[in-house]
Image (spheres, rainbow, N blue to C red):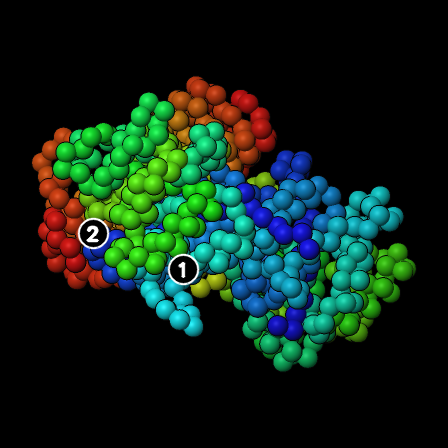
Amino acid sequence: MIERKKECIAMLLAGGQGSRLYVLTEDTAKPAVPFGGKYRIIDFSLSNCVNSGIDTVGILTQYQPLELNDYIGNGQPWDLNRNFGGAHVLPPYTRAKHSDWYKGTASAIYQNIAFVDRYNPKYVVLLSGDHIYKMDYHKMLEFHKEKGSECTIAVIDVSDAEATRMGIMSTDDNMAITDFEEKPKHPKSNHASMGVYVFTWDVLRQYLIADEEDPNSENDFGKNIIPAMLKDGRAMYAYPFQGYWKDVGTLDSLWQGNMDLLDPNDPLNIHDPNWKIYARNYASPSTRIDPGATVANSLVAEGCIIRGKVVHSVLYTGCVVEEGACVTGGVIMPNTVIKKGADVNYAIIGEQCVIEENATVGEKPESDDPFAHNGIAVVGHRKTIASGTVVKAKEII
Amino acid sequence: MNMTGIIFSEMYGEDLSVFTHDRNLAAIPFGGRYRLVDFVLSNMVNSGINNVGVLAKQNYHSLMDHLANNQEWDLNRKNGGLLLLPPFASEAVNHNNRGKLDELRNALNYLENATTPYVLLADAYVVYNMDYRPMLQAHIDSGADVTIAATRVEDSPAEFPSVFQAGRSGRVTSYALNCTARPGDFAGMGCLIISRQLLTSAIREYTARGIYHLERDFIQHQFNRGQLSLNLYEFKGVCLRIRDVDEYFNNSLAIIHEEVGGPLFRGDRPIYTRVTDEVPTYYGPECSVSACVIADGCSIEGEADNCVFSRGVRICKGAKVKNCVIMEGSVVGENVELENVIVDKWANITAGAELKGLTTNPVIIRKGATV
């Protein structure tokens, strides 16, 4: 029998809680959080894989996986329903000995060595399902091969202030990594890790096994695997990325990420027909805008019914804004109903919420800048805000 | 489900020839993101029918393309599923529409191999949202040979392809073709249930004698001779017939209204269509939109009033669009004024153009045209 093999497969870390999204990730994993009208955060990484020619993706889940499992299904929306390869959801599992949760990112991959080995790949792309960006992993893989690299880390240049919160790479002129620091107080460079790695699989495999055997390890790529490889003088390179890349892991950045899509020069450009972002679709009808409604500077997904006013907002699939209701600077997640006379300003409203008549969520500041606000109000998924209630700016329900 | 579905994707096509130049009737865009076939097909799926044959005769590339991924209708089944039934390379190919029996002859093998006792025959030109299960139950309970779905003609007399009168029990007492129905009469919806046995033997018997018209030569003829009993199933929901440009235009715009659009697009029985992964629609800072149905992937920067836009339509700044149906990917340039216009797919209305039709006679811009 001829062994089939893949040159490159992807492993996508989707088990994180995303605790800084508070109520929005209370019962769903961060990669499954809705984004940009009709997407979920994970759609961006998955679509990047497919658009980069990677047709095999292992999706590592752990925290609240129900919604994510359901969403991925057989991978068909991303063209990842393949006979050999495709999308595979990989939760932790029990074994004859040493059953364990995924203790860290490295342990998650370690526990799925058998999955990777099935495809016998030369390279593995390691991703996190937490970021909004468009990136051709194939180009990065070519870079990895050209440099004779064993580990390539995608980096984006950030400000000094941001650098103190991220993993920072120092490189020589040839982009070889000379130093790596996690959240440095005094960053030596501005190359921040994007959480996108290309590994030569047989090298990574050795390090994963060694790391698992080390009882003092936290089994984390940033804290253990990368420093260990660096210490051993492995061929490691930084791959510079230019373009839009956003960690939407906080409520503010999630809101801002949505508002960025309203920029006429949208730096992400989700409209690019050559780099489509795929998502699971739910057979919603076309959006209906009734007489008397106002919609301006907004993105509205399918299946919405608008009778009120919607400005500077992103409305996700199947939302209803009734007569006299007003949404300004709102990020309104799928199937939420804003009832008559309700007022929503600078807020994120979760899925399937009901904002009852004349309730107020968030505050509208006196300002000429349509995006200036006093803080984002947040309502978690499947909540009802009773009639007449006031939810203040920065409040999280 | 003990019923097989058959969809006729042609028939009234000739009255909509401006749209069927390079597609067949079933593939005509409707309601923003849909094609006409989506409605009957989704009705079948939502009624639990998972064997569906789609009869196609000519210009069916567009339809094949649309239905190619039958996953969207959940019809990628190991047992059953969706099958496109183009003609066999026989004499039938060389003739224009001789009748439904002729087309059904192409499906004879399919029907003979089906395992269900009943067959639902449905035309694609009628748009409605209906559960066929109660209709099948009514058919079985009535003991009639054929059950026909119909709507009651309420207001002014109008012409329909089939007109019925029926007693209180639903038993049909008169059946006329292509005539004017008066209030109280029933108008057929191009949808009937018949036993598979009766249908297949009729196809074989009639086509062998060179007789091809299903309604006239078989059903009406046998009914008039008292050899076929007809049961009428009244459908009380929204039913839009698309037989000519006027009906296409008016019914397209009708779905903007809650009383029409609401019952047609209901959450418990969704209408499925092909997924194209368009982005959400963008509404510009200066746009003004009122009474519109808008699909995904559009960009609206001008004014729109009482319009239906399919996917990926662009309305540029300063454009004013009123009472228009604009199909996929068409661009309405800056400061263009349109009123009572149907714009077919991928047309380009260049800046400054002004086009006005009448509500009874809309201007039609052909697919891919530049104006």
Q: Is residue B350 left or right of residue A182?
A: right
Q: Earlier in the sequence, mark 1 or mark 2?
A: 2
Answer whether labels 1 and 2 touch (C-beta < 8 Å). no
- The front one of A93 and A312 is A93
Instruction: Please identify the quarter of the rendering in which residue A150 is found.
Output: top left
The percent coordinates of residue B337 (x first, y second) are 42, 25
Question: Callout 2: residue from which chain?
Answer: A
Residue A329 seen in the figure: no
Q: Residue at x 79, y 74 (%)?
A: B227
The percent coordinates of residue B178 (x first, y second) are 69, 54
Question: In front of the other: label 1 or label 2?
Answer: 1
Q: Looking at the rendered structure, which numbered label has been put on residue A111?
A: 1
Quarter of the figure that contains the C terminus of chain A? bottom left
The percent coordinates of residue A81 (x first, y second) are 54, 53
Label 1 crowd bin: few (<14), some (14–19), many (20+), radius 10 Å: many
Q: Looking at the rendered structure, which numbered label has been put on residue A33?
A: none
Label 2 crowd bin: few (<14), some (14–19), many (20+), radius 10 Å: some
Quarter of the figure that contains the N terminus of chain A? bottom right
The percent coordinates of residue B84 (x first, y second) are 70, 53
Residue B195 seen in the figure: yes
Instruction: Please identify the quarter of the rendering in which residue B143 is found.
Output: bottom right
Amino acid bearing label 2: Arg
Q: Residue at x 42, y 70 (%)?
A: A95
Residue holding disc 2: A20
Q: Secondary structure at mark 2?
A: helix
Amino acid bearing label 1: Gln
- The front one of A338 and B12 is A338
Distance from Cα at disc 1 to Cα at disc 2: 27 Å
Question: Callout 1: residue from which chain?
Answer: A
